[in-house]
Image: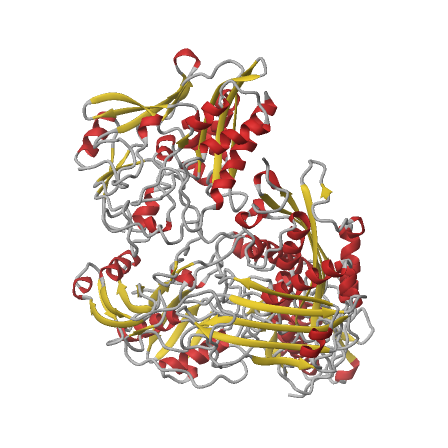
């Protein structure tokens, strides 16, 4: 671990100012915000992140979970994962988010981890974490060791020949299906980013994971209200039963009317380089009757562009079954 | 000292009674001193530099900038570590280690993660930063970490016979029913929560070493030989272990790095092995391929067993997993052949991992038996009952105590096996999930090794029992206290157990599940000798009511000396010692082991039966081990509470072996790539089945007077096969390459959802 300075801030402006001095908000930032520390500290110990300065933002008043306009929900950046998962409104209105958060990590980690921290959670690619290997995300231009290496848990959607790292978060898959908006305060003031535009595909610049710029501080997210009668569900498939990242997961939101699906959102985890919203699956389901065959067709559509690696070809079928089953579950509730 | 003829002890107020650990409060309050907890004035920290190639030579080490970093005292490499020697050949349980090359012996690198330097600094952070700043350059040579083992060149050039009787080839050729398959198990890494660690103190030519050791006496001998000092100049202390699973049986290179650094700097050095290094240089269960061929007649009677296995070992050391250890005696069969082979790979040296040999060996053999049962259309429990031997057919000896049939029948009854429908996928639970039921038999060595124990009865009314064994975490402190409590009648709280120090009378290793059985005769004998001395003192002490009585007239009951049979008039032993102004009376017991004795009258083994239930949801490829019934025939349980804990823990480890655990090498670099607890997946609570443990109560008095054998390892034997057999029953998929993974099961026939 490299030496670093730790400062505390008590205003958003001070926080933004402190981080603005870093040339980037992405991989290799010289100044990093720290909240729960459940992810960043690990990477600092491994010399994967070597910030010279940490800005402790735990003193900022960003923990609230409260109603937003038009029946939506506002979740503070520093709301702990546990508090979000067990919040009454989340459990009753957006169960997909509660289920997703509770399927991730462990109780102890969820007690510390924050909403915004989880939003920026790093990949679990073993090569990203081991500085003895090349990794374009960690050190641009050093090659992708996962291609042709240990890639069983890596992505099959949204990959490039520079990076196949999967996004490990469960929360973010649910937020993608809920069409959340990320609220940011930066050097130029406040702005909002739809989650669909928040994450960047690796392409030729896998070190850039989000659109965040130096100084940008996520202050909260908002989730719009779901149509009355909509149901949501999260299904996660993995090697062990708990404390393990998804091999495939599915977040689904559906409303049926007159025996047909008239509102649907689908996102998948464990398979994409980013939380994977599948408009293809949604299109396949819109206006259709909830039948196993239609679910399977949607799953086929969702995985249509999958590009498996040497060890993770099974994820294509697993993800299809995951989505099919999640759709069956959510419509059974309806 | 004369060897006592074992007198079976059938009754006891304390042996066989479920007893909480006497060291429990120390552990739960955090006051138990584990090796890395030890600290001394002036102590400095060591952090190793590990090779990032798997084969080649060091062409240069530039430590110039590291040496100038804050707090750095030294960077040691093969050029300046100072003298470290190899050990002479091992004899008995002395001079044993698996990686025989001293660290930093030369510039050659033979595995990824091999130590190439070590940084010493005032703080652990400074040491680690310096280690990371050491620049090592290499001349790489091609390496081999391939996990294809069978049919690749072995060290010996051919397979070595392990056991042989009859004409296996002819029997296989002529049989009506045959099975032939290869079973592969991956490299597995011991992952005790306590990291390996050494705290080395060097003063006036003598070493005091706080080690994570399952065998302090051997550790002392090896360290003395490798450091080049007489054994009396080395003391090894392991008060508590946060488990070891065999990985801490023998010394590993880090211990030499710490001791040599302490010597060179003349100050205490602490070295804690990092979790990622635990996957490299402190042993592992090797990758193994096993081909098992079985032949039977129509009734299911075995006609032939052939068991050929090959395991990987390192470039310098010959570690043989011993997979065919039980093949010769498990079943009655006229024609048996087992062979072994070792292949060299650029990996750290493998070592014993809980149930070495038997655990992977029985995974293969018991899977094959299940496959044969399917072919014969015979119930797998029945197939095993049909082939029960009357004696050990590999040696001709009678079994000392074998109740495998009862393990199987009791287990079948408890599990509800009679309700099993053998058709694949035919059974469902109340929620509609498919059920799979599997069974496997298991066995493990029973023996005892040399042991010496001292028991002291002190003026303060307490007893002190001392033995150079150690408690790996299984409850040795408590078991030893129970033995002495039984013999002296003292309550447990008045017995001090002193173990984990090489300066004590030499005791057994904490391995092979034989520490308890080994200590029994010596502990009882020591207590008896102490009692004799006490009674003798009573007859010679002025002011003692027993002065001038004959020793034969006296007895020592519940801590009191009295005239035989008289419940009144007794004197607590502490009073007698006070009257005599003698601080303590003591006795030493010494017993000779049976391990490796060619003149044994019996074949000593423990046995068991494992029944497993899995639930299977094909629509999402979700498999869960829901229930395990295990019945163990391992003699008398000295402490049934700790024994149950051993079996339960082993079952959970078996779930890991069957479904989760594998050390993955990146064959391009040769390094273990999932070298963390996040990526090397072990079972968590949510993976645990309901576990029902039954002990058959057949004391084995041929082994020791308490009839105790051991339970540290047998619980893991057979469990993986029971689970994979259940997986086959549920899914129709026979996984012969552990662990069973989701991708193996996705192809299950009839499981397509569309």
User: In the image, B85: left or right of B517?
Assistant: left
User: Please, is residue A195 above or below residue B473 in the view?
Assistant: above
| Percent x, y of residue B507 | 56, 76
Task: State the image quarter where residue B111 is shown.
Answer: bottom left
Front residue of this view, candidates B105 and B518: B105
Is A3 on the left-hand or right-hand side of B315?
Answer: left
Residue B494 appears in the figure = no
Task: Spot the residue most to the right.
Answer: B565
* Whole-percent x, y for residue B576 in the image: 66, 75
Along the viewing direction, whichever of A294 and B431 lies nearer the viewer: A294
| Front one among B58 and B3 | B58
Question: Which image quadrant is residue B315 in?
Answer: bottom left
Question: Is residue B219 shown left or right of residue A19?
Answer: right
Determine whether B85 is above or below A248 in the image.
below
One can see residue B405 in this view:
yes
For the C terminus of chain B, give its image quadrant.
top right
Tell me residue A309's x, y (percent): 40, 48
Q: Which residue is pictured at 46% across the width and 61% down the height?
A: B34
Looking at the rendered image, the quarter that the N terminus of chain B falls into is: bottom right
Query: How many numbered dots are placed on residues in this image?
Result: 0
């Amino acid at each position: 671990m490299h030496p670093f300075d730790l400062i505390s801030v008590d205003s958003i402006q001070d926080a933004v100012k402190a981080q603005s001095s870093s040339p980037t908000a992405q991989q290799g930032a010289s100044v990093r915000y720290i909240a729960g520390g459940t992810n960043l500290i690990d990477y600092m110990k491994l010399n994967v992140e070597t910030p010279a300065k940490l800005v402790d933002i735990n003193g900022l008043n960003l923990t609230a979970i409260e109603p937003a306009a038009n029946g939506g929900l506002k979740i503070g950046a520093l709301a702990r994962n546990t508090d979000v998962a067990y919040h009454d409104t989340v459990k009753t209105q957006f169960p997909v988010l509660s289920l997703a958060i509770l399927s991730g990590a462990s109780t102890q980690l969820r007690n510390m981890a924050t909403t915004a921290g989880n939003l920026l959670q790093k990949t679990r690619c073993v090569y990203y974490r081991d500085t003895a290997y090349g990794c374009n995300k960690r050190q641009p231009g050093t090659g992708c060791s996962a291609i042709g290496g240990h890639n069983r848990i890596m992505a099959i959607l949204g990959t490039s020949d520079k990076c196949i790292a999967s996004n490990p978060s469960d929360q973010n898959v649910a937020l993608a299906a809920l069409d959340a908006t990320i609220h940011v305060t930066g050097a130029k003031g406040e702005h909002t980013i739809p989650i669909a535009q928040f994450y960047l595909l690796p392409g030729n610049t896998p070190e850039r994971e989000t659109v965040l710029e130096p100084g940008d501080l996520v202050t909260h997210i908002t989730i719009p209200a779901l149509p009355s009668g909509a149901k949501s569900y999260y299904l996660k498939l993995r090697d062990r039963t708990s404390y393990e990242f998804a091999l495939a997961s599915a977040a689904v939101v559906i409303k049926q009317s007159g025996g047909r699906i008239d509102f649907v959102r689908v996102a998948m985890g464990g398979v994409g380089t980013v939380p994977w919203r599948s408009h293809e699956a949604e299109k396949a389901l819109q206006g259709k009757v909830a039948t196993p065959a239609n679910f399977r067709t949607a799953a086929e559509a969702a995985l249509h562009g999958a590009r498996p690696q040497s060890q993770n070809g099974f994820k294509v079928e697993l993800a299809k079954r995951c989505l099919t089953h999640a759709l069956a579950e959510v419509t059974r509730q309806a | 000292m004369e060897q006592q003829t074992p007198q079976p002890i059938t009754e006891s107020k304390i042996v066989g009674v479920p007893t909480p650990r006497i060291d429990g409060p120390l552990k739960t309050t955090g006051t138990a001193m584990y090796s890395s907890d030890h600290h001394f004035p002036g102590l400095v920290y060591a952090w190793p530099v590990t090779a990032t190639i798997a084969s080649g030579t060091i062409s240069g080490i530039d430590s110039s900038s590291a040496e100038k970093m804050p707090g750095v005292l030294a960077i040691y490499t093969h050029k300046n570590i100072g003298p470290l020697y190899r050990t002479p050949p091992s004899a008995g349980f002395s001079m044993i280690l698996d990686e025989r090359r001293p660290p930093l012996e030369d510039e050659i690198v033979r595995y990824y993660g091999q130590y190439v330097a070590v940084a010493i600094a005032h703080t652990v952070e400074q040491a680690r930063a310096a280690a990371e700043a050491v620049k090592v350059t290499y001349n790489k040579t091609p390496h081999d970490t391939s996990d294809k083992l069978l049919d690749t060149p072995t060290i010996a050039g051919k397979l070595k016979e392990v056991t042989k009787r009859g004409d296996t080839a002819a029997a296989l050729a002529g049989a009506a029913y045959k099975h032939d398959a290869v079973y592969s198990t991956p490299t597995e890494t011991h992952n005790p929560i306590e990291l390996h660690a050494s705290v080395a103190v060097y003063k006036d030519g003598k070493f005091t070493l706080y080690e994570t050791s399952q065998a302090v006496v051997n550790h002392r001998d090896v360290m003395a030989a490798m450091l080049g000092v007489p054994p009396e100049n080395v003391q090894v202390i392991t008060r508590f272990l946060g488990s070891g699973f065999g990985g801490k049986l023998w010394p590993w290179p880090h211990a030499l790095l710490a001791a040599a650094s302490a010597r060179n700097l003349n100050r205490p050095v602490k070295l804690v092995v990092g979790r990622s290094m635990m996957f490299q240089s402190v042993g592992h269960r090797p990758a193994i391929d096993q081909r098992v061929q079985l032949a039977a007649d129509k009734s299911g009677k075995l006609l032939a067993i052939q068991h050929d296995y090959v395991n990987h070992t390192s470039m310098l050391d010959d570690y043989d997993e011993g997979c065919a250890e039980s093949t010769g005696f498990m079943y009655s069969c006229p024609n048996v052949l087992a062979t072994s082979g070792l292949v060299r790979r650029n990996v750290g040296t493998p070592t014993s991992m809980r149930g070495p040999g038997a655990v992977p060996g029985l995974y293969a053999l018991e899977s094959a038996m299940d496959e044969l049962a399917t072919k014969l259309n015979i119930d797998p429990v029945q197939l095993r009952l049909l082939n029960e031997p009357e004696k050990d057919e590999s040696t001709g000896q009678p079994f000392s105590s074998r109740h495998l049939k009862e393990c199987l029948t009791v287990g079948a009854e408890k599990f509800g096996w009679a309700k099993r429908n053998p058709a694949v996928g035919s059974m469902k639970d109340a929620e509609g999930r498919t059920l799979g039921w599997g069974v496997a038999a298991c066995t493990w060595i029973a023996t005892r090794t040399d042991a010496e124990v001292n028991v002291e009865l002190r003026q303060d009314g307490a007893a002190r029992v001392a033995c150079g064994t150690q408690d790996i975490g299984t409850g040795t402190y408590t078991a030893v206290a129970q033995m002495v409590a039984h013999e002296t009648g003292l309550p447990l709280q008045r017995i001090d157990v002193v173990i984990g120090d090489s300066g004590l009378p030499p005791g057994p290793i904490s391995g092979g599940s034989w520490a308890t059985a080994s200590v029994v005769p010596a502990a009882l004998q020591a207590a008896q000798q102490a009692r004799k001395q006490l009674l003798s003192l009573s007859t010679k002490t002025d002011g003692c009511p027993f002065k001038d009585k004959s020793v034969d007239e006296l007895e020592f009951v519940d801590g009191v000396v009295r005239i035989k049979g008289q419940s009144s008039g007794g004197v607590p032993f502490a009073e007698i010692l006070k009257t005599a102004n003698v601080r303590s009376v003591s006795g030493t017991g010494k017993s000779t082991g049976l391990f490796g004795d060619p003149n044994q009258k019996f074949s000593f083994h423990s046995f068991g039966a494992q029944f497993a239930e899995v639930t299977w949801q094909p629509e999402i490829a979700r498999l869960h081990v829901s229930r395990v019934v295990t019945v163990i025939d391992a003699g008398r349980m000295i402490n049934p509470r700790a024994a149950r804990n051993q079996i339960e823990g082993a079952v959970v480890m078996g779930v890991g072996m069957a479904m989760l655990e594998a050390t993955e090498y990146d064959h391009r670099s040769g390094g273990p790539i999932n070298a963390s607890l996040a990526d090397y997946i072990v079972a968590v609570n949510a993976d645990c089945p309901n576990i029902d443990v039954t002990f058959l109560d057949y004391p084995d008095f041929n082994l020791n007077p308490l009839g105790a054998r051991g339970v540290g390892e047998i619980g893991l034997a057979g469990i993986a096969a029971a689970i994979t057999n259940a997986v086959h029953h549920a899914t129709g998929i026979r996984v012969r390459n552990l662990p069973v993974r989701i991708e193996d099961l996705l192809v299950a026939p009839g499981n397509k959802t569309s």
